[in-house]
Image (cartoon, helix red, strand yellow):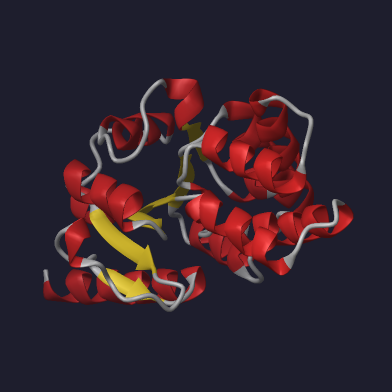
Amino acid sequence: MIWLLDLDNTLVSRDDAFAAWASAAVAADGGTDADLAAVVAADDGGFAPKADVARELIDRLGWTDDVPAAVERFRTGIREHVRAYDGVMGDLDALRAAGDLVAVVTNGVSHQQRGKIARCGVAAHVDAVVVSGEEGVEKPDPRIVEIALERLGATDADRDAVWMVGDAGHTDVAVGRAAGVRTGWVSHGRIWDSAHGAEPDVAAATTREVLAAARASARTVGRSA
């Protein structure tokens, strides 16, 4: 089996890191609960344009930074607060010990994504890392899946033996579907949005549960083949 995993909110707690940093930043600058709520909402789980988040911080907290400096300021805060989800690195080790291949496939700028990976020690638990900012292509473009398979030496792999796992329907599940591989969605308790298209092959609240369900599904397919 081949496992392609998103980074943010799949292997590491990016939203929790942003919220923790934002809470401290708002308090330090004398902001209110309303300011904190507005900043977190502006971030939109990391999918909002970074300049928009920076402007919200500047307007709400009276920062004197220009927009690029403000972007780097909150990116640094995220890196300083991010952590891997409990037990997930061990699950990746177990997959590799069983002979599976594992890669991180993440959208984002190089220094930010590599910084999170370094802080959380992710690289030691995977076989390859693919960062969109280094490749010039990002999810949901299926070319990024092909890049990951090439890095793993698995360009000819049976697509039914490849899983794309992540928390974002419009990027992670969409790219898996576009690439013709199987998909696992980390819901974090959310309901699947039909606007993202057909439901993923498996879905569960946590990454560990998705991996377990995907492995069970793979075994079932193997027995029926």
Residue 48: x percent and y percent? Answer: 47, 44
Number of residue marks: 0
Going 51% across and 35% down the picture, which residue do you hit? 108
- Quadrant position of residue 28: bottom right
Residue 111: x percent and y percent? Answer: 65, 29
Q: Is residue 205 above or below residue 107?
A: below
Q: Is residue 67 above or below residue 83?
A: above
Q: Nearer the viewer, residue 97 or 115?
A: 115
Going 69% across and 57% down the picture, which residue do you hit? 17
Q: Is residue 149 above or below residue 193?
A: above
Q: Nearer the viewer, residue 185 or 4?
A: 185
Q: Is residue 54 visible?
A: yes
For the C terminus, the image quarter is bottom left
Q: Is residue 42 left or right of residue 168?
A: right
Residue 43: x percent and y percent? Answer: 54, 50
Q: Is residue 88 left or right of residue 213?
A: right
Q: Residue furthest left?
A: 225
Q: Is residue 105 left or right of residue 84?
A: left
Q: Is residue 162 visible?
A: no
- Quadrant position of residue 157: top left
Residue 205: x percent and y percent? Answer: 44, 77
For the N terminus, the image quarter is bottom left
Q: Nearer the viewer, residue 177 or 95?
A: 177
Going 48% across and 73% down the picture, which residue do you hit? 206
Q: Is residue 76 above or below residue 26?
A: above
Going 36% across and 26% down the picture, which residue do you hit? 137
Q: Is residue 150 left or right of residue 86?
A: left
